[in-house]
Amino acid sequence: MEDRRITNSFPDALVPVLRQLGSDLAAARKVRDMSQADLADRLHISRKTVVSMEKGDPRVNFGSYALAAWTMGLERGILEMFSPDRDPVFQREARLGLPERVRAATSAQGPMGDLDF
């Protein structure tokens, strides 16, 4: 079988991550008493693609993983992948973007401005 470009350029650090994702997918499928063929039928993909997903093959498109998660009721986990709450860079930048001090309002209307009842 011919090696594709993605397998040659895929970062080594991500290989165990995809293998874990595939292993978790297989476990989720098994606990739901679904065969690989059942999952493939529900996703409208081949059983061979399900096997590739469970092996952590980087050539499988993300849409297949997303559809598999949705089929098993696990789509909320996808939303958390890029959540700012879980992103340390976002958290650091958000902290750095805060003003060092907050000045009191200089308006004659009081500290609440137009919102003063």
Image: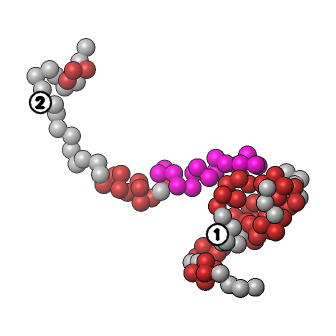
State the count of labels: 2
Q: Residues within 10 Å of mark 2 (few under 14, many from 20)?
A: few
Amino acid found under the numbered disc labelled 1? Val
| In the rendered image, the vertical position of residue 31 relative to residue 59, given as above or below | above
Front-lying residue, 101 or 21: 21
Label ID, residue 17: 1
| In the rendered image, the vertical position of residue 11 relative to residue 23, given as above or below | below
**Residue 19 can be seen, yes or no:** no
Amino acid found under the numbered disc labelled 2? Thr
Q: Residue furthest bottom?
A: 2
Q: Is residue 9 left or right of residue 64?
A: left
Q: Earlier along the polypeptide chain: callout 1 or callout 2?
A: 1
Q: Which residue is mark 2?
A: 106
Give the residues in magenta. 70-85
Q: Quadrant location of residue 40?
A: bottom right
Q: Is residue 106 left or right of residue 78?
A: left
Quarter of the image that includes the N terminus:
bottom right
